Image (tube, rainbow, N blue to C red):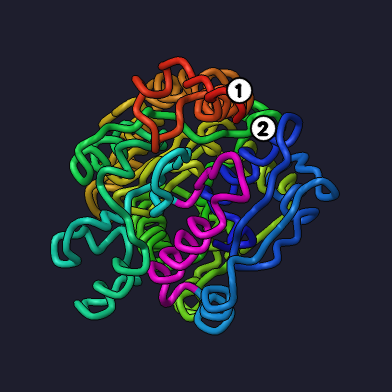
Amino acid sequence: MDLMSKGGGEAVAMNVLEALQSDHDVTVLTLTNPDLDELNEYFDTSVDTEALTVEQAGYLAPWMNEQFGLKYYVLQNALLGRYARRQSDEFDLLVSTINELGLESDSVQYIHFPFDWTVSCDEREHIFHPTVEEDSLYERLATRVAGVEREDIRHNALLANSAWTADVVEDAYGTRPEVLHPPIDTREFEDLSWDEREEGIVTVGRIERSKRIKELIRITEGVRERGHDTHLHVIGPTVDDEYREEVQALAEGREYVELEGEIPRDELVERICTHRYGIHGKEYEHFGMAVAELAAGGAIPFVPDNGGQHAIVNDREELLYESVEDAEEKISSVMADPDLQRKLREPMGPEPIRRRFGRQRFQREIRQIVAEALNRPSAGVSEAAADAPAEQPASGD
């Protein structure tokens, strides 16, 4: 909806554009007018800004986004999908990088986490979409606008960012997506020696309530109270001004917390590569691209014990925490144990993460998936009918 949010979903979108631009004419349907040069610099992508067409999705959804930001996130998403469906005849293929939309058939849909359009609001996990109001009228309106049908979802090429997300999609729609981990750019990361790194912690992600940055500050405080001279860097763009003010108020007077906000890419990479530890606060994280970047930079990342980020830390119990107190204890234990630090760092660093989650892998697979989608029979025609020989016209036709 808004590429300038600069989160993991937007990184996926920019990499999809870069992957497809050489072989296809590409149009972006979105709610805002993105600064593609800034995004190329931020994500280290090379999207051709001259060749790309950007089209705002009608009037209502862009207006809502401008007026309310993410307050009516789900309705805006539904309107975006509705607009894309109306414009589908203009394109050979629709590719969604904003979860499952009501695009009927013949589309590729990358699901970070499903909206579960076909189940009631009361049954949804509200933690995943905190902007969904506890209001059946709003829920019915968004669902009606979205127009998502289970059968359409099943006939699309579905991709999920993690096995955990794929499980949730299967529960929601009765069909399992192919897992395609999102692209992690490891090219700038350097695996500095442990001795060259600061005994500090880095967290990377948008400054918003679901990232639980206030809890991360308290965790750092608790680790310090256990005798470790550590500090915390908070890095990422602000998308919730009210929450940033709360974080800033908590950080004031704590000299060991540096609220940096959005910083240039080279500085972000430098922070990660020169610190020993990383931490992520979002519970039920769908994959956790920021966690993978921490690992690519050679930092040991600590993450909540639920969600798709399990895959990044190889299910190591020492790196999975259940609460603020549990995180304090586990981080302190690792900081006090050099032998454990060496073991936990073995699968970290640029090369191991590149092999598992690198962007070339992602872009290559996206190109293949799109090619297959373009070559398959139209969803409106059965495979048998598509394979049957064409009927010869009568004489004189």
Residue 354: tell me if it is visible. Answer: yes
Q: CA distance from mark 1 to mark 2?
A: 7 Å
Helix, strand or loop under label 1: helix
Q: Nearer the viewer, residue 347 or 41?
A: 41
Looking at the image, which residue sits at the far right? 50
Looking at the image, which residue sits at the far left? 123
Helix, strand or loop under label 2: helix
State the image coordinates of residue 177 (x, y, percent, origin top left). Answer: 34, 32
Q: Which residues are magenta?
A: 70-98
State the image coordinates of residue 116 (x, y, percent, origin top left). Answer: 26, 54
| Residue occupying image coordinates x 37% and y 54% | 282
Tag 2: amino acid: Ala
Magenta run includes residue 179: no
Residue 349: tell me if it is visible. Answer: no
State the image coordinates of residue 100 (x, y, percent, origin top left). Answer: 39, 49
Viewed as shown, does residue 217 lie left or right of 54? left
Residue of label 2: 19
Tag 1: amino acid: Arg
Which one is earlier in the sequence, the residue at label 1 or at label 2?
A: 2
State the image coordinates of residue 383 (x, y, percent, origin top left). Answer: 36, 23
**Residue 364's mark?**
1
Q: Nearer the viewer, residue 89 or 41?
A: 89
The C terminus: image quadrant: top right
